[in-house]
Amino acid sequence: MKSVFSVAGLMFMRVLKHLPLSWLRAVGWVVGHLLYALALRRRHIAQVNLARCFPQQGDAQRRQTVRRHFVLFAQAWLDRSWLWEGRPDLVRRRLRLTGHVSELDSRMPTLLFAPHFVGMDAGWMALTAHVPRRFCGLYARQRNAVLDHWMAQGRRRFGEPHIVAKSAGLKALVSALRAGEPLYLLPDMDYGPRDSVFVPFYGTDAATVPSLSRFARMGGARVLPVVSRLTPDGYEVTVLSPWQNFPTDDVVADTARMNRELEAWINAVPEQYYWVHKRFKTRPNGEPSMYR
């Protein structure tokens, strides 16, 4: 039964890719409001996250931000229809790559810090579609075979990227870095207590994987942040300047810096960050869950 729904969903996405972007975004607006009304657990998670990170917001403002987030989340998901199967010229036209793009010409080992904004897949597509070099990215296999194939093929459609399975371990990623393949990394989530450190995120200790600092050290790599923002015309993907004095000898301080930098980007477009994730799921010293 799951495979039948997956095939039907894929057919639906293949119809959507032909719609004008304004029409597709309108469909996303409807789907987002439906998700806000029906996905009660995820709505609660987003509300808790925002209450913790933006305590200055009143209840009405917080509800508005969460509702807007669900709309943008749905629009970004439906945009994968044209990102992964639309005409190449259309994809490139809708993905605007800005900022320090010339830094991507360097053959220095480079980590691309790509936070979990709703446009994170658009960020990867913009890099591989516009920059004539090979990038490296991590891929987590999906349980559903139909969905897994569609997602994997979509992310490979430009530039013959080097896709490494999460189960492959560190060696393959460090080797890719040292070979000059920029590594697209999304380390800003709570992946549990294993290999995590607790550092502040909006003033609350959050379990955070220190992979950005460790990969930078092991691969002798610099860090280039890549921030993706959904816009009415598609996406703006901005390559920021390389971080100075990173990494240091203190992996915890490096990871705390990563979160501080991230907060500034979130503050610019708070509704576009991935709030439906339990960012404070893992608690230190047996603290109770925030999401009960």
Image (tube, helix red, strand yellow):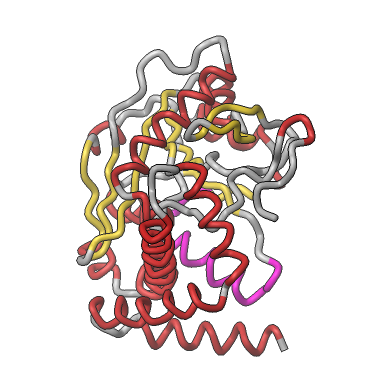
Left/right placement of residue 65 relative to residue 235 reads right
**Can you say whether 249 is above or below 135 in the image?**
above
Left/right placement of residue 94 relative to residue 71 reads left
The image quarter in which residue 267 lies: top left
**Can you say whether 179 is above or below 188 in the image?**
above
Residue at image point 35% right, 82% down: 27
Number of marks in the rendered image: 0
For the N terminus, give its image quadrant.
Answer: bottom right
The x and y percentages for residue 219 are 54, 23
The x and y percentages for residue 200 are 54, 29
The x and y percentages for residue 284 are 72, 32
From this viewpoint, which residue is outermost toward the right? 286
Residue at image point 23% right, 68% down: 89
Say if the magenta span includes residue 144: yes
Q: Nearer the viewer, residue 242 or 182?
A: 242
From this viewpoint, which residue is outermost toward the top? 249
The x and y percentages for residue 123 are 37, 52
Q: Nearer the viewer, residue 57 or 232?
A: 57
Say if the magenta span includes residue 258: no
Residue 158 visible in rendering: no
**Can you say whether 107 is above or below 276 in the image?**
above
**Can you say whether 100 is above or below 82 in the image?**
above
Residue at image point 41% right, 45% down: 134
Left/right placement of residue 280 relative to residue 282 reads left
Q: Nearer the viewer, residue 172 or 27?
A: 27
Residue at image point 24% right, 70% down: 90
Residue 225 visible in rendering: yes
For the C terminus, give its image quadrant.
Answer: bottom right
Magenta residues (range): 143-162
